[in-house]
Amino acid sequence: MNHKLTIFSFILMLPMGHALANCQLWDARTLGTKTNIIRIDINNQNVFDNRLSAENKTFHKLVNKLRIKTKRHVIVRELLFKVGDPFDWRVLEETERNLRSKPYIKDAQVYPSQQCDAGVVIQVTTQDDWTLEPGMALGVSGGKSKFSAELQEKNLLGLGKGLELKYKNGFLRTETSIRYDDPNLFGSTKRLSLRYQNNSDGDLKQLRLENPFYALTTKRAWQIDVSDWTLVNPIYQRGQIVDEIGQNRQQMSANTGWLLRNKQRKYHRLRLGFTTDDNTFFNSEDYLQSTLPDARDYTYPWIGYELIQEDFIERTNFNGMGRTEDVALGHHLTVKLGRDFSLDSTFFEFNHRKGYALNKHNMVTLNGYLTGIHNSHGLLNTHIGFKTEWYYFQSPNKTFYISTRFDKGTHLFAEQPQYLGGETGLRGYPFRYLSGDHVWLT
């Protein structure tokens, strides 16, 4: 019986073995030829490549041994293609971006390595990033000090899951928190995020479960987000607390989305959702006689539209040192409109972002937005503004950066004024020194 099984297995392998035997290195001149993917080779590397002399010291070997390398099946789950799919260069590019967006992946390359009679062989090479982050920080900004201690693992047991334990004595409150993120729940495309904070002024509990648009061509998506937060909002003037507003906020939002159209690397999406936002207010122990805002209880359905233009460039040392990152230059537009019929209130959001690579040394990003509420009394808690950023890449390791941000607020909620001070980069100014409705910061 064993001999028959061996012979049968050998016969089954003959066609594939013959196909792979007639292979040659990938030739870009065959790019327009229609073919299928017949094999995927995965090379998931550790943080350091000990085959390189520069990364073969005792320190590099020790780092590799101290951590668990990303599991092969975790990399496979993030691929946007499989054996048997038609070869599509665009899908390979998006898969690279998808892998590099993971906090545990430092760099990724996805490319065709061999052209065979039966199809093409795809090579997937990833390099892990160091993800265990024990930390302790002590700092002063605007005359106020902060201290934090945390233990964060972004690739728990090499499975791509995140766990964070944190203590923070910050500017506004003392936090003790735990957070868990699972980007592939039970091996699926669903994502789970759990968060709990025990704060000096209350607690925060949050759950998010979603099946996102994990690829640009994904047809359907949905999301459920529930949170319950009790906090105290300190109100500042000239860097001093002059009032406090206690707040109980319970939110729930659920939505589902569809890909409407996909043409010329432009992706149009539609979302339908429902949101409840219940806010009640209380006096803090230090300000028992303060006047409180009226309770707010919004319940509304909404419709949203999103446009994504697929246009990216690769940069190294952009937001993280040593990481290869994909910077979006294409149009990204989101529009959202909701209506609470019982309160005669309309909720609106508009956001548009676009980047421009002027040349190999200069890049500019522009972002404009409008968000707020309109009711029978007019605009409420409305923000209109823009942000402009200029990057001058002097060398692979040096970047000159300038940003300008403007925000005009109208009838803002009492617990949400705008601030400028040491915490926003104004050197020599106290924490939250200036307050008001409008902000201009360069």
Image: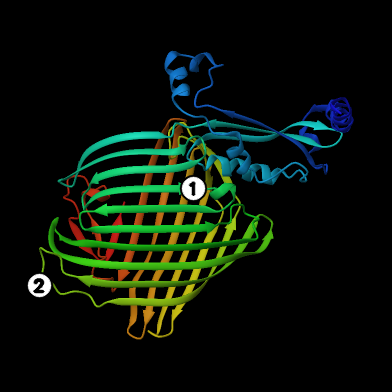
Figure quadrant of residue 77: top right
- Other-residue count near label 1 (Cα within 10 Å), few / some / many at <14 / 14–19 / ≥20: many
Task: Name the kind of residue labelled 1 in the image.
Answer: Asp
**Whether residue 141 is situated above or below residue 339 in the rendered picture:** above
Callouts 2 and 1 close, C-beta under 8 Å: no
Figure quadrant of residue 139: top left
Task: Name the kind of residue labelled 2 in the image.
Answer: Gln
For label 2, the SS is loop
Q: Position of residue 433 (x, y in %)?
A: 17, 55
Query: If you read the primary sequence from the N terminus, does the residue marked by circle 2 or circle 1 appear first?
Result: 1
Q: Position of residue 415 (x, y in %)?
A: 24, 67
Figure quadrant of residue 202: bottom left
Which residue position is annotated with label 2? Answer: 289
Q: CA distance from mark 2 to mark 1?
A: 45 Å
**Whether residue 380 is situated above or below residue 7 in the rendered picture:** below
Which residue position is annotated with label 1? Answer: 182
Q: Depth-wise, is mark 2 or mark 1 nearer the camera?
A: 1
| Viewer-nearest residue: 264 or 225 | 225
Quadrant of the drawing holding the N terminus: top right
Side of 117 where 345 appears, left or right: left
Side of 407 where 428 appears, left or right: left
For label 1, the SS is strand
| Viewer-nearest residue: 187 or 144 | 187
Scheme of colours in the image: rainbow
Which residue is at 48% across, 53% downward?
192
Which residue is at 55% across, 53% downward?
190
Q: Position of residue 418 (x, y in %)?
A: 26, 62
Side of 160 where 238 appears, left or right: left
Which residue is at 52% across, 48% downward?
183
